[in-house]
Amino acid sequence: MITIQLLPTFRTPGSMPNVHNHQPGSNRDAGIYRLSDAGVQRLLLQEGCWTPDSLLYSLILGLGIGVLGRAPFWPLVLIYTLFILFHLKLFRHFPQQKAGWSGYEVVVESDRVLARKRDAVECTVNRSEITKIIEHPIHGLWIYTQDRSKIIRAPKMLTGYQKMRTMLTDWVAIERRGPRQLWIYFGMPASLAFLASTLLVRSRYVFFPLLAIAGFYLLRFARISIKTWMGSYGPSPSGTVKDPNGVLALPFMLLALLTVKLVWILLYW
């Protein structure tokens, strides 16, 4: 009698047969790009929120310019005391603002893009629905469709942003629009501190370079404000529509103050 012993067959992990059939849009091919905690804080700063980072930038930039330009001591102290108090007052909104972006992620699958927040899908755009993708140098990507209610934002602070951008480039050519605006990069509060110190300095050698920088950005801001007032600029990067009359008045008011300061410098210093 011949006895045949059957030995068990072992397979390496790489030789195991794949029993899962790939489906288009399955999570197996998904790239998930999230906002880190630091990314959320940076995003809030660029959105013009009053955050701990904006307070730090405001004090460093504003007080530095004021001291360098020989600004009067007590007005400088008064202005930045008000800055600190205003920040402290608005800090109570910071946890709510932070929670609004925490858990936000963009998922790029083989045939669609999803925006999710805490695993809840907020928007889904199929590849065939995409009409254009616009990249702003600071804000990141905006994915548009024919339906204005279906727009996905992919902030530049997302982890793996460049990889995601490369994947989307294979779908649609990405249009780049807008320059790098330093007043957005450092936040609106720091920009206001910059302007406040520019109005306070007494040194001509400090004032005129600051005037050139402030005038350049205020003129651009005025142009954007006029377009917003005319209704041709569209929604802001944060997805909200602000009061156009208030937006229109602000840059011209600041330009008027700079003009008065310029006349004062030329006549009395």
Image: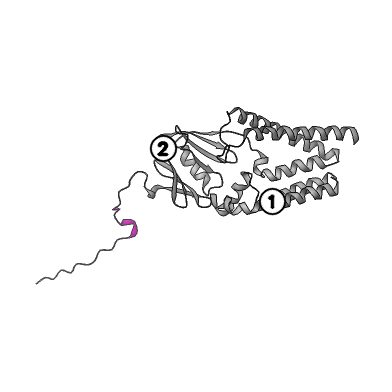
Q: Which mark is residue 87?
A: 1
Asked if the magenta segment contains residue 190, the reply would be: no
Which residues make up the magenta segment?
1-23
Q: Residues within 10 Å of mark 2 (few under 14, many from 20)?
A: some
Q: Quadrant of residue 215?
A: top right
x and y percentages locating residue 183 in the rendered image: 68, 40
Q: Which mark is residue 127?
A: 2
Q: Is 121 or 216 nearer to us in this picture? A: 121
x and y percentages locating residue 247 in the rendered image: 65, 35
x and y percentages locating residue 81 in the rendered image: 77, 51
Residue found farthest to the left: 1
- Residue shown at 67% from the left, 49% from the top: 54
- Residue shown at 74% from the left, 44% from the top: 193
Mark 1 element type: helix
Asked if the magenta segment contains residue 4, the reply would be: yes
Q: Is 138 or 236 nearer to us in this picture? A: 236
Image check: 25 left or right of 192?
left
x and y percentages locating residue 156 in the rendered image: 56, 44
Q: CA distance from mark 2 to mark 1?
A: 43 Å
Which of label 2 and label 1 is nearer to you? 1
- Tell me which secondary structure the magenta stretch mostly adopts: loop
Q: Disc 1 residue type? A: His
Q: Earlier in the sequence, mark 2 or mark 1?
A: 1
